[in-house]
Amino acid sequence: MDIAYIVVSLLAAIWIMIPAYVPNSAAALFGGGRPIDLGRNFSDGRRIFGNGKTYRGFFAGVLIGILAGVAEISLRSAMGWTFLPEQTLLSVSLLAAGALLGDLAKSFLKRRLGKERGEKWPVADQYDLVIGAFLLVLIGNPEWFFNTITVPIAIWILILTPLLHRAANIIGYLTGVKDVPW
């Protein structure tokens, strides 16, 4: 593998994941209001998701993720950046929604394990959005997934995600959007 291929794969990984990376930060920034679980508990007596998962945050996050993806589609076309993977309205919508559905699934599992809101859960905290995004794209647009996510791109996504997750959480903490820096 030459250096150009490695760099293009890195750029492609970032490009593909922008619609999935943006929603979590947007949900934290614009969240609040009515919790998705409406304050209800699961059969184990613990909250289903918790106060941190709200309708406003979920829908704002998905919308902003989709808008980021639409901007990518327009920018790729306008700039002629054919070296970057082609996004579609369907792919960016599935990536954005899947990222937050993965976060919701992780929150559900965290509550079942007795973990509190904001408590660290290494690996799950970093990869929930990737798993959710990939699963939803695999269900809703498998052809795009298999034509777009190559092995080198997948490796870059696995490397970049925890680094970007940590950086975004530190920024969120420093700006007062998050209560904890993880």
Image (cartoon, rainbow, N blue to C red):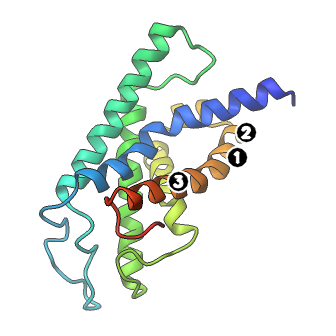
**Residue 152 tag number:** 2
Q: Earlier in the sequence, mark 3 or mark 2?
A: 2
Mark 1 is surrounded, within 10 Å at the Cα level, by few (under 14), some (14 to 19) or many (20 or more) other residues, namely some
**Residue 167 tag number:** 3
Nearest the viewer among 9 and 131 is: 9
- In the rendering, at what x and y percent does residue 134 appear? 51, 48
Q: Which residue is located at x 49 percent, y 66 percent? A: 125
- In the rendering, at what x and y percent does residue 7 appear? 73, 29
Q: Residue furthest right?
A: 1
Q: Is 95 drawn above or below residue 179 in the view shown?
A: above
Q: Residue furthest front?
A: 174
Nearest the viewer among 177 and 51 is: 177
Q: Residue furthest bottom?
A: 45
- Secondary structure under tag 3 reads helix
Which amino acid lies under the numbered mark 2 shown in the image of this protein? Pro
Q: Quadrant of residue 94?
A: top left
Q: Which residue is mark 1?
A: 155
**Residue 97 tag number:** none
Which amino acid lies under the numbered mark 3 shown in the image of this protein? Ala
Q: Disc 2 versus disc 1: distance between alpha carbons?
A: 5 Å
Q: Earlier in the sequence, mark 3 or mark 1?
A: 1
Which amino acid lies under the numbered mark 1 shown in the image of this protein? Ile
